[in-house]
Image: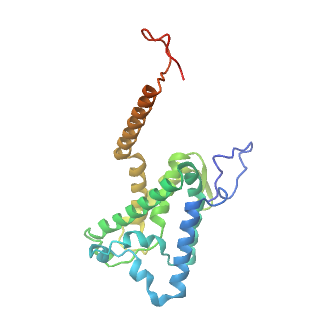
Amino acid sequence: MASRSPYRPSTSGFAYQFGPGPMTPAIKALVLANIVAFVATWVAPSLNLVGWFGLRPDDVFGLQLWRIVTYLFLHGSIFHILFNMLALWMFGVELERMWGSRYFTKYYFVCGVGGAATMLVVSLLPGFSGMYQALTIGASGAVYGILLAFALYFPNVPILLFFVFPVPARYAVMIMGGIALLSSMEAGGGVAHAAHLGGLIAGYLYLKGPRMHLLSEIKYRFLKLKINRSRRRFDVYSGGRGAGGGDRRVH
């Protein structure tokens, strides 16, 4: 899934690089936490970390609420954690640089919890009762949310879909979202496609939903009010001449 960095324009259409550069602080912390949890799972199987911290709807509805977060740090195989952490690094670094570590971390967990919530809802649907006792682990729900955000902010950056076909990010995420949607309609299969879809939906609603527009508008109005108060306090005005304003001092 090599991609060309949106901040490193090239004179050649064939100049690609693998990855966005060094890990940013939040991504470094997330990758380290996932690696530690993975090693602990394999080195000390008697601790049964997956059983205690994996996402099982039956346990979550029994008020073991920590599972909707802790399942994100558990992985079932070396390839499982490798691909998730690789995608997190490749597509998350540019987002963290742009957003800052605090907002990026918040977004990551919103998508991960959104994936968990989707699994819980699906487990209650007719025909999916087997999922009620099934364990889900992995950071894929959060990673899918990262992919969505990358596609929204860098829609034309090429992604090697299935490591073969160069596709603009916005179309690659649409394809992966469609696959997750169709797959989530089939009970079983061993892959938590509903969590993937939930991560996508949660990420989109967080970035584009009406709640965020309302919060942005409130923050804008509050900041504008503070600026206007400061201007009046220090006798600052925007320019131009009002009635009798010729002698006012401009700062």
Question: Residue 177: which quarter of the image?
Answer: bottom left
Q: Where residue 127 appears, x then y in whole percent?
A: 27, 71
- Return the residue found at the far bottom: 46
Q: Residue at 74%, 44% (x, y): give it.
A: 12
Q: Nearer the viewer, residue 201 or 73?
A: 73
Question: Residue 32: which quarter of the image?
Answer: bottom right
Q: Nearer the viewer, residue 122 or 251?
A: 251
Q: Is residue 84 left or right of residue 15?
A: left
Q: Where residue 89 appears, x then y in whole percent?
A: 59, 61
Q: Where residue 152 appears, x then y in whole percent?
A: 50, 47
Q: Where residue 80 appears, x then y in whole percent?
A: 53, 73
Check the image and report above or below for 192 versus 225.
below
Check the image and report above or below for 47 versus 204.
below
Quarter of the image with the N terminus is bottom right
Q: Is residue 185 left or right of residue 84?
A: left
Q: From where the camera sits, is residue 49 visible?
A: yes
Q: Is residue 22 left or right of residue 195?
A: right
Q: Residue at 37%, 66% (x, y): give it.
A: 116
Q: Nearer the viewer, residue 102 or 172?
A: 102
Question: Residue 198: which quarter of the image?
Answer: bottom left
Q: From where the camera sits, is residue 87 visible?
A: no
